[in-house]
Amino acid sequence: MFFTGTFFNNTMFLLFLVGLIVLFLSWGFKQLPRERWQIFAAIPLLKNDNGTWKGLNLTYYGIISANAYLFSLSIMIILLGSCHIPVSVQMKYIIPILIVAIPASRIVAWIVERKSSTFTVGGATFTAIVMLPWVVTVINGFFDFQMPFFCFFAAISIAYTFGEGLGRLACISFGCCYGKPLSESGKLMNRIFARCHFIFYGKTKKLPMPPILTATP
């Protein structure tokens, strides 16, 4: 039969992936602009003389970003596995990239924005892309196994797309990524985004005055 074996498994996997992402994005666009999805928890660090506390905020931005990293890494492992590359071999190439790229998300943010407490996925991505050909070339020189450049770059490109797309939800949650107000847009933009928009709530968002309609990225 036509729908048997590998084709059936691949089709079911893709349908599951599409359904999962559609549900997650639909929920995220509707719920994450709300104020309650900005701060996940606060860790008290120092008590002031007046009885108030200084604390460390743990944000949904960080949680969603971490999950996006994990999801994209999982996709990459699955795709490389489909090329018959064992996970143990994959890690020899992936771990060196992560060791440099993850800290780079903070270092690049400090260099560009001069803010010590800011992270940027773009900074990590830029660093990883610059490193990729060098990492593969160097590690291929140390091991008998030769990582196929085409398979590795194709897998990481697809995985990055998933991670970047889901990572945008973190920006929506924190209110640091938004479009132009529809009231200041042209007729065509108003027509396109009349229904495809969301509303930010919360005084700690970067928006001037909540609520405000913005185009969905």
Image (cartoon, rainbow, N blue to C red):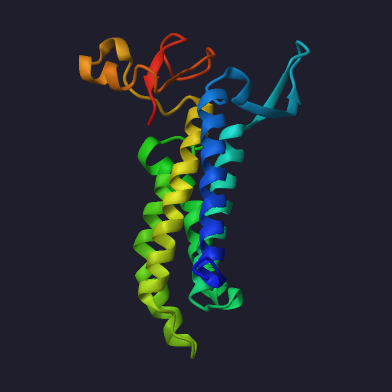
Q: Residue at x 48, y 17 (%)?
A: 200
To which quarter of the image does residue 154 belong? bottom left
Q: Is residue 143 above or below residue 69?
A: below
39 left or right, relative to 179? right
Residue furthest out toward the bottom = 144
Which residue occupies the foreground of this view, 17 or 94?
A: 17
Q: Is residue 169 above or below residue 193?
A: below
Q: Is residue 82 above or below residue 211?
A: below
**In the rendered image, is residue 73 in sight?**
no
Residue 89 in picture, x, y percent from top left: 56, 78
Q: Residue at x 28, y 16 (%)?
A: 190
Which residue occupies the foreground of this view, 158 or 97?
A: 158
Q: Residue at x 61, y 33 (%)?
A: 60
Quarter containing the C terminus = top left
49 left or right, relative to 204? right
Residue 214 in picture, x, y percent from top left: 38, 19
Residue 191 in picture, x, y percent from top left: 28, 17
**In the rendered image, is residue 110 in sight?**
yes
